[in-house]
Amino acid sequence: MVGGRCVAGFLLGLGVAAGCSTSRAVRTELGMAQPGEAVGAVGELMSARDREQLATIAAERAEASAEDGYRIGPDDLLDIRIPDLLEAGGAQGQSARAQSGATLPSVAESPVFQLGARVSASGQVNIPLLGLIRAEGFTPTALEQDIARRLMAARILKAPQVNVLVTEYRSRVVAVVGSVEKPGLYPLTRPRATLADLIWAAGGPGKDAGREVKFVPAADGAHPDGMEPIRSIRVDLETLLDATGPETKALNPQVRPGDSISLSPAGNVQVDGWVDKPGSYPVTRGLTLTGAVAAAGGHLFPADRRHVTVKRVLGAGEQRYFTVDLDAVSQGRAADFPITDGDVVRLPPTPTRVAAWGFWAFAKEIVHIYGSVPVF
């Protein structure tokens, strides 16, 4: 009786396995590209749309004129120093003494003027004797020259020496957050700074960083004609940092104030199918398909190592299925497949091996059952 139930269970198991195999194959075929459609390189993390948008931004920003340094903006805090410039009251006193015939103090006796000024929302700062002047849009050097010109035009000083220093950067910054060593707001003090430059300025990828970088251009960022404004572009961190030649310009655009860069954590990969321990496993930087399978206890005998599938979501409504030959990888005939957060790895069965596996499992179960029955 027990043997009959085991045989029935074994046959049912074979039917279920065969059914699962067919279902997986159909789903894989539905996920594959149609003839003539580009699927992308093995391990592709960026969608075609991501690459198109990023290349468009890189090209348009490269054509724009390069800024010669940090441009002062609203809410920045400035330290303005003007040797020889007296306070307003002192200047008025000098004028009165001059009219009465009194001797004016020499330049060496004049105090050094120093002002900590916060740029207003309208982009102006208030300087005694000059009043409100525009600071927004100037580099510190250009603002020094403008203040000096105004002092000479007003005949306040003949040869003024003006020094302007930005002590707090608040306006023209790029946010670099997520899995980086030093997340925060970084001012664009370097002309033509790029996406990769800002990641390294933040200390580089953190220990828990994955491969995905979410790049959100500023509201006035470029976008392809006929397409909606760009909200978020998925960038492959490994490709970005290792890019050389023409690919560097297309994948590593110059950044602009208001851009946002976020490095996602490594996340998890789901390993399913004919492995010893199916489940979810943490992704580490550099994790490959063979490593993920090993983390799941390795493949079982029925597994079809030549048709391992990896499902990857590339964006909203866009996903790809990749088929990898692990035998070719282990023999060095193919490159290993890089794994990223959200991947689903499935090892399908080989029908002929499923039958052999079933007979072996059946025999093992019989020995286990009857081996535990006491003999009198």
Image (spheres, helix red, strand yellow):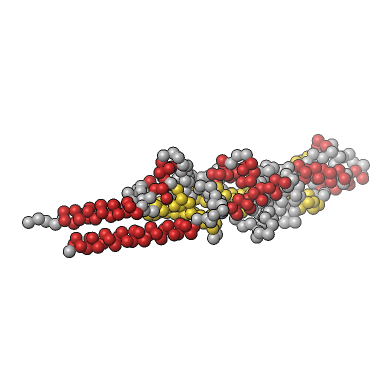
Q: Provide residue 142's location: percent of width, then percent of height.
A: 77, 44
Q: Provide residue 135's location: percent of width, then percent of height.
A: 76, 50
Q: Provide residue 46's location: percent of width, then percent of height.
A: 56, 51
Residue extending farthest to the left is 376
Question: The N terminus appears in which quarter of the rendering?
Answer: bottom left
For residue 6, what is the image quadrant? bottom left
Instruction: Kindly identify the residue that appears in the image at 41 percent across and 60 percent down.
Output: 23
Residue extending farthest to the top is 108
For residue 20, what is the image quadrant? bottom left
Q: How many marks?
A: 0
Instruction: Kindly identify the residue that appears in the image at 46 percent across and 50 percent down.
Output: 323
Left/right of residue 64 with respect to residue 3 in the rendered view: right
Question: The C terminus appears in which quarter of the rendering?
Answer: bottom left
Instruction: Kindly identify the residue that appears in the image at 80 percent across and 37 percent down.
Output: 109
Camera sees residue 173: no
Q: Provide residue 360's location: percent of width, then percent of height.
A: 25, 52
Instruction: Kindly identify the residue that appears in the image at 63 percent across and 46 percent down.
Output: 250
Foreground pick, 212 / 72 = 212
Camera sees residue 329: yes
Foreground pick, 281 / 182 = 281
Please determine whether, in this image, residue 361 is positioned above or below residue 2: above
